[in-house]
Amino acid sequence: TGQILARLAKDSECYWAADISKVAIEALEKNHPLAQVKLFHRPADDFSEIPDAHFDTVIINSVAQYFPDAAYLTRVLAGAARVLKPGGRIYLGDLQGSALLSTHHAEALLERAPDGTTAGQLRESVDRRVAHETELSLDPAWFDFIPEQIPEFTHIETLLRRGKIFNETTRFHYDVILHKQPAPDTYEVPEPQVWKNLNLEQLEAILDGSKATVHLTGIPDARLVPALGFHRALLAAPTDGPLPAIPSAPSNAASAEELFALAAHAGFKAHVRWHGDGTDGLLDVVFSTQKSLPVWKKETHARPSAAFANVPFAAGASASDIAPELRRHLSARLPDYMIPSVFITLEKFPLTPNGKVDRKALPAPSEVEAPAAPRRVVAPRNETEAKLLEIWKQVLGKDDLGVEDDIFELGGDSILIFQITTRATRAGLALTPAQVFRLRNVAALAAASASTREKPAQAAIQPANRDAYRRNL
């Protein structure tokens, strides 16, 4: 949408950006006609026509989660390293912690769990949600392996997110900055002091008037402790037991934002990160007055880098999705209102102890949707199809569409269908919502529109002489 572009482009000597959506790129070209801005319609790993060592900074913000897998992200980082100047940086924003996925989903599903849901039922829902996670998630440890694959990166920062509000991004997400060689100025982190019974007031007294670097470890994370406590209690609860309560954070817990704010008040800079992968609910922080960056003690990992990243469901699914075939089959036999809006593929049905299908344990459509099967994108073959397809792209916000794609398989609903017919009418194509519901794709609608135009105009209805039907008084 150009939120970063709008802030940075006008003050940049050169601002180039890429997006996989052609619609988005065309909109940005109209709204930001700056000489230093150049926009590309392409996937994130395509760095062709971009000169080597040309940029100071590469920003990949809130999009890495949509990459198909960790290997794709590695390719993107390798391409970005090539176009960065020496000493340049890559900012990776809004990354989801992989080890925290089940905790996040457990809390999210709890909020919508109906009365009477048991611990076993919620655990099964969480397992399904994690197994069908469609977005890429990575633990901070995954980046410890990057210098082995891309030697140009000599220093990596892991940053927790600022924000007073406790929400998904401030609690379960983090940011990363990768520095290209030569390495920035750094200093060794001193031995840590364990938080134990300390609190924020005591920490403020420690920092007050001091210039020494302070390293603290084991700080209870006020953002994560309640969710982690609930998840642990859920795992330990009896299958048929009630849902456990969400515990409170310890009185001496602190959030990353409170540590950042306290550091700024005392004249320090805070470097805050999770202790490990975040699942123990603890924070590590370094307070320093130095302008250089801290070098934390390097951790050794017994597991390979792949163990610190998930495999998004769409990338790892092996079974072919039969939803499009089912939809076509039912469309020929049932009225529209009887056709399911969502098809879900299960490896097996959940069963009750009596061997019957456990209907309460079946996933709700909002919990998991089967991935779309690879499809053939059919290009428009005439002017009418081209006009209609462009309208579909604008309304649906998708660029990779073909004239034979089903409106409902693309996520269309009655509101979007009314928008499509309104825009089509303005473009001189007479369509009704009923036609879109019935015909479902651009090719069929274009043919129907052409057929309508070819029919001879019907004679206008003539007004009847009402005198013949009036009572004689």
Image: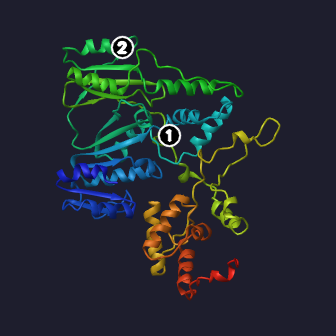
Marking on residue 199: 2
Horizontal relation, residue 140 to residue 466: left or right: left
Q: Is residue 225 left or right of residue 116?
A: left
Which of the 4 quarters of the picture holds residue 97?
Answer: top left
Asked if residue 282 is positioned above or below residue 133 in the image, the reply reads above
User: In the rendered image of this protein, does residue 433 appear above or below residue 291?
Assistant: below
Give the alpha-carbon distance from disc 2 to disc 1, as whole Å.
35 Å
The residue lying at 25 percent from left, 61 percent from top is 38
- Mark 2 burial class by Cα count in 10 Å: few <14, some 14-19, many 20+: some
Q: Mark 1 belongs to which amino acid?
A: Ala
Which quadrant is the C terminus positioned in?
bottom right
Q: Position of residue 197 (x, y in %)?
A: 40, 10
Determine which residue is flagged by label 1.
Answer: 307
Can residue 351 be spotted in the picture?
A: yes
Task: Tell me the residue at 70%/66% (across/down).
Answer: 329
Q: Secondary structure at mark 1?
A: helix
